[in-house]
């Protein structure tokens, strides 16, 4: 669990995260200045780029108060997987925004 030792249950109003979200298979598509100089753990999130979201979303549900918000930066092509992770009774008001390139880049969800 990401927040287990730091935050008590239902103690936060807002969680904002820019997690690692690049799929390992996409490493060769990154610009060399990113791929060769950024820390591995800051970029990569498993085979499909969603491993951190799979841990973060349940932990955020536990630590957020009812009505609290989760805001996530999204990697390329992970929006549908993240939306599925938020498709539970714990979350509502799931919405997203796009960046200037038309990529779904930020997702918001409210803790019920």
Image (cartoon, helix red, strand yellow):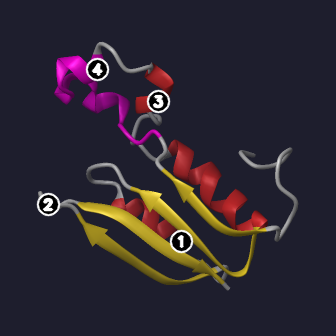
Q: Quadrant of the C terminus?
A: bottom right
- Residue 36 location (% of width, % of height): 29, 13
Q: Residue at x 62, y 53 (%)?
A: 56
User: Mark 1 or 4, which is nearer the eye?
Assistant: 4
- Residue located beneath label 1 in the image: 86
Direction from residue 94 to residue 75 in the image, left or right: left
Marks 1 and 4 sit apart, C-alpha to C-alpha, by 29 Å
**Label located before the other in sequence (3 or 1):** 3
Magenta region includes residue 34 = yes
Marks 3 and 2 sit apart, C-alpha to C-alpha, by 23 Å
Q: Residue at x 55, y 44 (%)?
A: 52
**Of the pair 15 and 57, the residue shown nearer to us:** 15
- Residue 27 location (% of width, % of height): 28, 25
- Residue located beneath label 3 in the image: 42
Count of numbered marks: 4
Residue 100: mark in rendering: 2
Q: Residue at x 53, y 43 (%)?
A: 51
Prevailing SS of the magenta stretch: helix
**Label located before the other in sequence (3 or 2):** 3
What segment carries the magenta color? Answer: 20-35
Magenta region includes residue 25 = yes
**Label located before the other in sequence (4 or 2):** 4
> Would you say the residues marked 4 and 2 are in contact, meaning their CB atoms lie under 8 Å apart?
no
Marks 4 and 2 sit apart, C-alpha to C-alpha, by 22 Å
């Amino acid at each position: 669990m990401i927040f287990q030792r730091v935050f008590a249950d239902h103690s936060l109003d807002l969680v904002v995260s820019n997690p690692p979200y690049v799929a390992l298979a996409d490493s060769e598509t990154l610009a060399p200045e990113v791929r060769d100089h950024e820390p591995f753990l800051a970029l990569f999130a498993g085979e499909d780029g969603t491993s951190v979201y799979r841990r973060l979303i349940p932990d955020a549900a536990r630590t957020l108060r009812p009505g609290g918000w989760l805001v996530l930066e999204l990697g390329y092509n992970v929006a549908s997987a993240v939306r599925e992770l938020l498709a539970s009774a714990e979350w509502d008001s799931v919405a997203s925004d796009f960046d200037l390139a038309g990529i779904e880049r930020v997702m918001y969800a409210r803790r019920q």
